[in-house]
Image (spheres, rainbow, N blue to C red):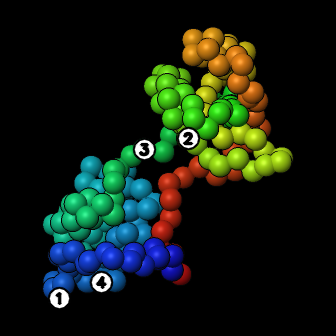
Amino acid sequence: MNTPAPQPNRQPGNFLFNTEAYSAWGLLRLRQHLEEGLPLTPRPYLELAKRTGLTEQQVLDAVEHWQQQGLIKRNGLVVKHRTLGYTANAMVVWDVPDENVSPIGKALAAVPFVTLCYQRPRRLPDWPYNLFCMIHGVNRERVLGQLAHMTETYNLSHIRHTVLFSNKAYLQRGGRYVSNR
């Protein structure tokens, strides 16, 4: 099982489930099922209750508790963009002077067609890039046009960058933290 590393100086918080009313195995199974996504039914929490041996109210309580504790930050949707026709997907990598990474990263993160933007450490001498942004598009010409517009708008033409178009998607899903074994 993947478990988070112990957090030094962290005090245990309120633990809602210190009662026999909540099955520990049911809660573990609930976490596994939540990582796979909500069932596509009119009452997904009832379906999760059936799969885990909990009641629907216990599932709702657990999800609310985990949200309050920060274990679940948000519920989202994983869009299979290739299925929707977005097959020209480019990761643009930039070699930004360290003192400018934050303002440029924030500017690029605000561009509507940029879907991811983050900083990573350089891996010198082979990899000088420290700022990454993703553009999902329906064709390469449009993505390159968007990149040119962004480069001009934010005066980035002097910053070394390269475009890495993806060829094939092998996996796209949310994180998994509880083993099924």
Q: Residue at x 22, y 74 (%)?
A: 13
Taking depth in this image into account, of 117 and 129 the one nearest to the observer is 129
Q: Residues within 10 Å of mark 3 (few under 14, many from 20)?
A: few
Q: Residue at x 48, y 45 (%)?
A: 78
- Which three-letter amino acid code belongs to the residue tagged 2? Tyr
Q: Position of residue 34 (x, y in %)?
A: 38, 62
Q: Report if residue 55 is visible in the image.
A: no
Precedes in sequence: disc 2 or disc 4: 4
Rendered image quadrant of residue 130? top right
- Which residue position holds label 1? 20
Q: Are marks 3 and 4 in contact (CB under 8 Å)?
A: no
What secondary structure is marked by label 3?
loop
Q: Are marks 1 and 2 in contact (CB under 8 Å)?
A: no
- Height in image: 166 above or below 51? above
- Which residue position holds label 3? 77
Classify residue 27 as left or right of residue 180: left
Q: Residues within 10 Å of mark 4 (few under 14, many from 20)?
A: some
- Which three-letter amino acid code belongs to the residue tagged 1? Glu
Q: Report if residue 167 is visible in the image.
A: yes
Q: Position of residue 35 (x, y in %)?
A: 43, 62
- Which residue position holds label 2? 118
Q: Are marks 4 and 1 in contact (CB under 8 Å)?
A: no
- Measured Cα–Cα span from mark 3 to mark 4: 27 Å
Taking depth in this image into account, of 47 and 178 the one nearest to the observer is 178
- Which three-letter amino acid code belongs to the residue tagged 3? Leu
Badge nearest the viewer, 1 or 2: 2
What secondary structure is marked by label 4?
helix
